[in-house]
Image (tube, helix red, strand yellow):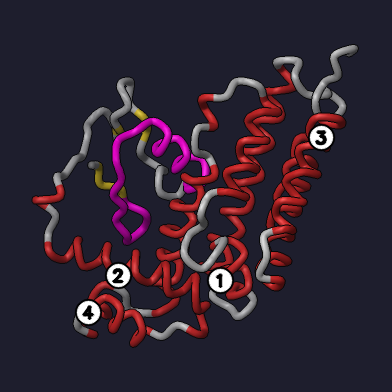
């Protein structure tokens, strides 16, 4: 396991290429100084900083538990609907322990979003690097979005975006950055597809990325209201058709 810092938080995850790459793509603030090493390890200025779970301090374990628990509660109840008392009750920790790590609810919400978004991003990028054609990469990403169980409470980006309207500039900045990074990941796939002759060179990569994101997030909202997944599956079908007939270079090109 490796120890990663994101501002004042600590994240731990297994050393696998897929996890590392998806984290760097979607959460660059976490990976600002951490780079993927030659054999899958992380390097920071040439030296690796590792810690086994057995050597985690009690404070680090408590802090991580708070972030993980808060991520679920904020995502399910919303920033306004979730109190610090709820988090204390769910973690089983003392109130003083919570405030010893996080002085404000706003501070904790930012780190909770980052944790929830990383988990979500990993799932949406699962196996992307095992596919070679740009269109197939996009279709796999869409399938991951539609058919992989989401983070408890649904899409963190959609949920936290609602809370952004209530203030908390730091959270607003993180949510906007997450959206921009997601768009960037999809746009890069399209750009690489254009270079490889797989995608129509006249297509604007960011316009396609925005369309994919908008349809998926919009369908998610509709599915939540109707308590049915039909909207998501309809969005997947139409997006796949759009990618095959409009974005993909035709066989006669």
For disc 3, the neighbor class at 10 Å (few under 14, some 14 to 19, many from 20) is: few
The quarter of the picture where residue 226 lies is bottom right
Instruction: Please report the residue visible at 78 percent of the width from the left and 47 percent of the height from the top.
Output: 211
| For marks 4 and 2 on the same chain, the one whose residue lies earlier in the sequence | 2
Residue 136, how many percent across, how many down? 66, 28
Question: Is residue 189 toward the left or the right of residue 19 in the image?
Answer: right
Name the residue furthest left.
55
Q: How many marks?
A: 4
| For marks 4 and 1 on the same chain, the one whose residue lies earlier in the sequence | 4
Residue bearing mark 1? 169
Residue bearing mark 4? 92
Could you give the CA–CA distance between mark 4 and mark 2, rounded to whole angstroms?
10 Å
Magenta stretch bounds? 5-27
Q: Secondary structure at mark 2?
A: helix
The quarter of the picture where residue 204 lies is top right
Q: Secondary structure at mark 4?
A: loop
Question: Is residue 218 toward the left or the right of residue 189 in the image?
Answer: right
Residue 208, how many percent across, how many down? 78, 40
Residue bearing mark 2? 66
Could you give the CA–CA distance between mark 1 and mark 3, rounded to whole angstroms?
31 Å
Name the residue furthest top.
252
Q: Secondary structure at mark 3?
A: loop
Could you give the CA–CA distance between mark 3 and mark 4, rounded to whole angstroms?
50 Å
Residue bearing mark 3? 204
């Amino acid at each position: 396991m490796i120890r990663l810092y994101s501002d004042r938080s600590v994240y731990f995850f297994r050393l696998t290429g897929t996890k590392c790459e998806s984290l760097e793509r979607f959460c660059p603030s976490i990976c600002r100084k951490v780079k993927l090493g030659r054999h899958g390890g992380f390097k920071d200025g040439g030296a690796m900083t590792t810690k086994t779970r057995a050597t985690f301090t009690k404070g680090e374990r408590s802090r991580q538990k708070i972030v993980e628990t808060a991520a679920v509660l904020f995502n399910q109840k919303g920033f306004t609907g979730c109190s610090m008392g709820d988090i204390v009750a769910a973690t089983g920790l003392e109130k003083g322990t919570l405030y010893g790590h996080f002085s404000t609810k706003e501070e904790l919400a930012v780190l909770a979003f980052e944790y929830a978004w990383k988990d979500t991003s990993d799932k949406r990028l699962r196996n992307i690097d095992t596919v070679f054609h740009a269109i197939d990469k996009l279709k796999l990403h869409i399938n991951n979005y539609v058919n992989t169980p989401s983070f408890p409470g649904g899409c963190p980006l959609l949920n936290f975006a609602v809370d952004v309207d209530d203030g908390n500039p730091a959270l607003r900045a993180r949510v906007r950055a997450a959206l921009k990074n997601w768009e960037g990941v999809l746009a890069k796939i399209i750009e690489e597809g254009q270079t490889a002759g797989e995608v129509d060179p006249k297509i604007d990569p960011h316009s396609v990325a925005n369309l994919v994101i908008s349809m998926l997030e919009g369908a998610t909202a509709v599915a939540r209201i109707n308590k049915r997944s039909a909207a998501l599956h309809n969005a997947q079908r139409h997006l796949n058709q759009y990618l095959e007939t409009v974005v993909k270079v035709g066989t006669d090109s």
